[in-house]
C-alpha cells in the first residue's frame, strides 16, 4: 500500500477511534469534562472533514495521464474516503450536545442535530446566518453580545423552553469558534430531588430529636448517679444531632434562595456581637482583638450575615490552641470592604483549601467533632456570601495560622447615616 493510501484510511480510523473514545469518556465522566471532551471530538471531526474533503477533491481530479490501474486505485480510495466522511459526519451529528461552528464574524457554518433541537436552528436556512441574530430574544444573545467570556449556566434552551443549558464558546482553528450547549435539565432535576430529600429528612428528624433532647434534659443526673456519664454523653450527642439538622435546614433554605432581603446590617453592633461570642467560646484561652478602619454598614440579610461572620470566628477559636490569638477585622478597601478573621492556629495544608467549603469536608473529623463542629459551617458561609455577591478567600500556613476573608463589593456598603457608600 502506498504511504498516501495508508494515510487515507489511518487518519479517519484514528480520528474516528478518538471521537468514539472521547464520547465514551465524556459520557462516563459527565459534567464539565464532557464539554471539553466533546470539543476535542468535534474539533477532530471538523479538521478531518476539511482534510478529507480536500483529499477527495484532489483524487477526483486526478490527472488523466494516470494508468487504468492507478485510476482504479484513486477511485477506490476516494470511495473509501467518501464513506469515512459520511460516517464521521453522522457521528458528529449524533453527539448529544449541541455543537455550532461559527466563523470570525459569527456566521453559522455548521451545526449538528442536537443544535436543531436545543437551539432551534433550522437546516438549511440558518447556514450563513449570524448566530447573534438567530438567538435574538434569548439569554444566549445577551451573553454572545457581552463577549461570551465565561460559560453560561442554566440558560433556557431557545429551542425547548422546558430545558436548561450550559453553554460555552471556544476558540477553534485560526479564526473560528465552537459553541457547545449541553442539556442539563436532567441534572437539575436530580439536584432538585437531592435537595428535597435532604430538606425533608432534616425536617422529619427535627421533631423527634427535640422530644428526645427535651426528655434528656428532664432527667436529673443526681437521681441516677450510676448513669450520670451516660446521660451527659447522650445529651451532648443529641445536641450535636440537633445542630446538624438545623445546619442542614439552613443550607437547604440558602440553596433555594436567589436573593436576600436588602436590609441595613449595622456593622458596629454585629462586630461587637461576634467578638462577644468568640470570647464566650474561648473562655479566656485566646487573645481576641477587633480592628476596624471603617464605620460602613452592610446591605443584606442581618440573620444570614451574622451566621456567616460568627461561623468564621467560631472556627478560629476551635482550631487555635490555647494561648493563640485571633484578630477580627472590618476594613474599607478600594474594591469595597473586607471582613476577615485571622488566627494563629493549626493552619490548613494547601491541598485541602479548595474543598473546605464542601459539606462535611473536614481535615480532621475527630478534631472537628471534639470541638463541636458539624462540618457544614463553611458551606453555609459560602452560600451566604454568594447571596451577597461576596467572595470568600482563605489563606493559611500549616502550623502558623489562617485568615478567612469575606470581600464585599461597593454595592453592598452603606454609610452609617443611611446613604449609599459605594
Ligand atoms: P466544622 O464544623 O468541621 O468546623 P466547617 O465547614 O466550619 O466545619 O470547616 C470545615 C473544616 O475546615 C474544618 O473541619 C477544619 O478542618 C477546617 N477549618 C475551618 N476553619 C479553620 C481554621 N480557622 N483553622 C484551621 N482549620 C479550619
Image (spheres, rainbow, N blue to C red):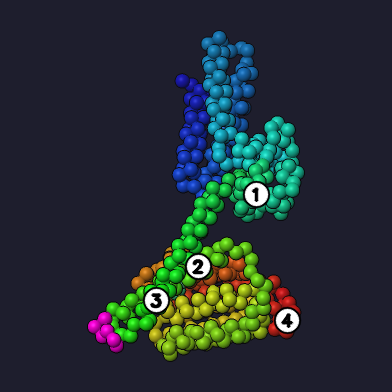
Q: Secondary structure at mark 4?
A: loop
Q: Secondary structure at mark 2?
A: helix
Q: Are marks 2 and 1 in contact (CB under 8 Å)?
A: no
- First in sequence: mark 3 vs mark 4: 3
Kindly identify the residue that appears in the image at 57 percent across and 62 percent down. Answer: 256
> Which of the 4 quarters of the picture holds residue 218?
bottom left
Q: Secondary structure at mark 1?
A: strand
The answer to whether 114 appears left or right of 202 in the picture is: right
The Cα–Cα distance between marks 3 and 2, rounded to whole angstroms, is 18 Å
The residue carrying pointer 2 sits among few (fewer than 14), some (14 to 19) or many (20 or more) residues within 10 Å by Cα, namely some
- First in sequence: mark 3 vs mark 1: 1
**Which residue in the protein does label 2 denote?**
249
Residue 229 shown in magenta: no
Which region is colored magenta?
A: 222-227
Residue 167's x, y, as percent? 62, 48
* Of residues 12 and 62, the one drawn nearer to the viewer in this rendering: 12
The Cα–Cα distance between marks 4 and 2, rounded to whole angstroms, is 33 Å
Q: Quadrant of ligand 1?
A: bottom left
Q: How many marks?
A: 4
The disc label shown at residue 418, or none: 4
* Of residues 170 and 312, the one drawn nearer to the viewer in this rendering: 312
The residue carrying pointer 4 sits among few (fewer than 14), some (14 to 19) or many (20 or more) residues within 10 Å by Cα, namely few
Q: Quadrant of the C terminus?
A: bottom right
**Which residue in the protein does label 3 denote?**
213
The disc label shown at residue 156, or none: 1
Amino acid at each position: 500500500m502506498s504511504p498516501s493510501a495508508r494515510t487515507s484510511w489511518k487518519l479517519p480510523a484514528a480520528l474516528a477511534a478518538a471521537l468514539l473514545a472521547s464520547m465514551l469518556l465524556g459520557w462516563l465522566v459527565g459534567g464539565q469534562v464532557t464539554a471539553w471532551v466533546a470539543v476535542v471530538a468535534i474539533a477532530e471531526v471538523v479538521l478531518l472533514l476539511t482534510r478529507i474533503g480536500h483529499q477527495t477533491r484532489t483524487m477526483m481530479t486526478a490527472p488523466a495521464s494516470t494508468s487504468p490501474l492507478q485510476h482504479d486505485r484513486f477511485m477506490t480510495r476516494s470511495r473509501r474516503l467518501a464513506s469515512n466522511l459520511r460516517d464521521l459526519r453522522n457521528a458528529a451529528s449524533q453527539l448529544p450536545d449541541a455543537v455550532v461552528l461559527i466563523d470570525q464574524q459569527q456566521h453559522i457554518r455548521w451545526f449538528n442535530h442536537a443544535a436543531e433541537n436545543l437551539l432551534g436552528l433550522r437546516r438549511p436556512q440558518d447556514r450563513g446566518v449570524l448566530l447573534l441574530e438567530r438567538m435574538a430574544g434569548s439569554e444566549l444573545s445577551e451573553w454572545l453580545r457581552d463577549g461570551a467570556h465565561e460559560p453560561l449556566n442554566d440558560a433556557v434552551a431557545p429551542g425547548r423552553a422546558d430545558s436548561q443549558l450550559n453553554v460555552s464558546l471556544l476558540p477553534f482553528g485560526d479564526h473560528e469558534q465552537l459553541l457547545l450547549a449541553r442539556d442539563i435539565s436532567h441534572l437539575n432535576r436530580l439536584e432538585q430531588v437531592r435537595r428535597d430529600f435532604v430538606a425533608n429528612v432534616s425536617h422529619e428528624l427535627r421533631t423527634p430529636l427535640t422530644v428526645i433532647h427535651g426528655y434528656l434534659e428532664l432527667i436529673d443526673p443526681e437521681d441516677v448517679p450510676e448513669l450520670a456519664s451516660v446521660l451527659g454523653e447522650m445529651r451532648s450527642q443529641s445536641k450535636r444531632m440537633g445542630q446538624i439538622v438545623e445546619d442542614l435546614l439552613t443550607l437547604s433554605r440558602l440553596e433555594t434562595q436567589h436573593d436576600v432581603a436588602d436590609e441595613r446590617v449595622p456593622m458596629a453592633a454585629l462586630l461587637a456581637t461576634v467578638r462577644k461570642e468568640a470570647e464566650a467560646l474561648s473562655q479566656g484561652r485566646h487573645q481576641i482583638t477587633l480592628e476596624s478602619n471603617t464605620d460602613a454598614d452592610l446591605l443584606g440579610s442581618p440573620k444570614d450575615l451574622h451566621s456567616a461572620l460568627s461561623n468564621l470566628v467560631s472556627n478560629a477559636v476551635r482550631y487555635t490552641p490555647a494561648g493563640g490569638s485571633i484578630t477580627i477585622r472590618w476594613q474599607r478597601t478600594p474594591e469595597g470592604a473586607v471582613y476577615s478573621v485571622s488566627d494563629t492556629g493549626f493552619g490548613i495544608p494547601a491541598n485541602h483549601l479548595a474543598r473546605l467549603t464542601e459539606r462535611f469536608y473536614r481535615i480532621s473529623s475527630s478534631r472537628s467533632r471534639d470541638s463541636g463542629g458539624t462540618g457544614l459551617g463553611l458551606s453555609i458561609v459560602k452560600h451566604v456570601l454568594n447571596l451577597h455577591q461576596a467572595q470568600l478567600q482563605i489563606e493559611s500556613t500549616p502550623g502558623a495560622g489562617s485568615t478567612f476573608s469575606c470581600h464585599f463589593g461597593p454595592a453592598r456598603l452603606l454609610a452609617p447615616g443611611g446613604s449609599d457608600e459605594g
